[in-house]
Amino acid sequence: MPDLVDRILQGDVRAASQLMRDLDDQIAGAVEELSKLFPKTGRAYVVGVTGSPGTGKSTLTDRLIAHYRAGKKSVGVVAVDPTSPFTGGAILGDRIRMQSHATDEGVFIRSLATRGNLGGLSRATGDVIRVLDAMGKDVVIVETVGVGQDEVDIAHTAHTVLVVLAPAMGDDVQAIKAGILEIADVFVINKSDREGADRTAKDLRSMLELRPKSAAPAWEPPVIKTVATEGKGTQELARALDQHRAHLESHGEKAAREQQRTRSEFLGLLRDRLLAAAVARLQSEHGSLDELVRQIAERRADPYRLADLLASRLTPKERK
Ligand SMILES: Nc1nc2c(ncn2[C@@H]2O[C@H](COP(=O)(O)OP(=O)(O)OP(=O)(O)O)[C@@H](O)[C@H]2O)c(=O)[nH]1
Ligand SMILES: [Mg+2]
């Protein structure tokens, strides 16, 4: 039987699932498999889909899957901390479509519940994206609920960030958080079958106008209205994604993003590994971490000196 890496490179779903599981469980050797895959990655186009809970991210993602599949593109999906889960490419309750994607070899869906794990959201997500990329998926869609740090992480992970909003109730333009304006490449006002969609779109556009303009050639995030449950607006959305991708490629921004993304991933990896090694070292020298923390809290140990001491072992020696 060919080895795991070869099978993944050939797009083998079971091999890919196994590696993802092994990575999750931190099985010895799993990371080595990932590093063997690494040189073969970097081809997939990664789209981040974020927005408040229940705005329709999964339903929209499902529409995008169908769109890309119709164009014979293979698709990977990572749903991070889903509250309304995917089941084989569609939303629970949408049985006919669910079955159609579930048996589609060109679609691979993986849910991740990573909140609270050491190492956090970004690395686990990055690992899964990498495996999907190595499998040859043309497009990888990453769905995250837009809260806190995840928003920033997604901006560092995806080539194109899609922010999904639903029509605002009442007069709360503030519902559009400032941070989201910075990370969005494309806006969707989903649930446009509901009242207030035009106003939300208008409010959003005027907020975008007020933004300080960056240096040319700047990308102006389009605002697209959709009704994901009916598939309305999917074509426009897909076109906007294509345009953003083309924009990235034609202005050298793709390389810049890749650099930024690689940087943040690499630093994250270093942080994880170094922290784990440092904690192991501390424990071997001082007993349990909890005990050490207690000593620090009681002012019996010096956190600065301990941290500096550990770090000094890594500091390059000064050349004479
Ligand atoms: N009226 C209307 N309902 C929609 C639309 N799109 C999605 N919904 C419904 O809104 C609910 C939430 O949709 P999801 O796609 O699960 O939303 P989500 O953003 O993925 O939700 P979380 O992952 O839980 O944050 C479901 O009941 C959908 O059927 C739409 O365009 N119009
Ligand atoms: Mg969802």
Image (cartoon, grey):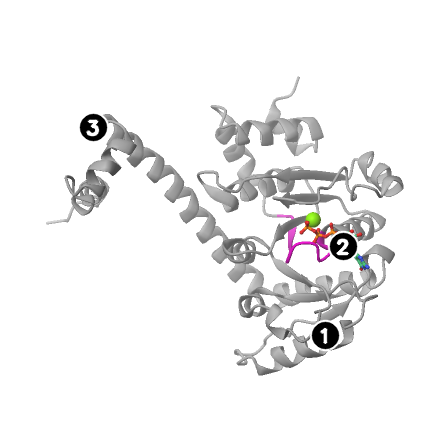
The reply to whether dot 3 and dot 1 touch (C-beta < 8 Å) is: no
Q: Name the residue under label 2.
A: 60
Instruction: Classify residue 315 by image quadrant.
Output: top left
Q: Which of 280 and 34 is in front in this view?
A: 280
Circle 3 residues within 10 Å: few <14, some 14–19, many ≥20: few
Q: Which of marks 2 and 3 is nearer the N terminus?
A: 2
Q: Nearer the viewer, mark 2 or mark 1?
A: 1
- The residues bearing labels 3 and 1 have C-alpha atoms spaced at a distance of 59 Å
Is 100 positioned to the left or the right of 49 in the image? right
Q: Residue 285: which numbered mark, if any?
A: 3
**Structural crowding at the residue carrying mark 1, measured as other residues with C-alpha within 10 Å and reported as few (<14), some (14–19) or many (≥20):** many
Pointer 1 residue? 201
Range of residues picked out in magenta: 43-57
Q: Which amino acid does label 3 sit on?
A: Glu
* 38 part of magenta stretch: no
| Residue ranking furthest to the front | 170
Percent of width and height locating residue 273: 38, 37
Q: Which amino acid does label 2 sit on?
A: Leu
Q: Is mark 2 within 8 Å of ligand 1?
A: yes
- Asked whether the beta carbons under mark 2 and mark 3 sit within 8 Å of each other, the answer is no
243 lies above or below 230:
below
**Visible residue check, residue 190:** yes
Q: What quarter of the picture does the N terminus occupy? A: top right
Q: What secondary structure is marked by label 1?
A: helix
Compared to 22, does 213 lie above or below?
A: below
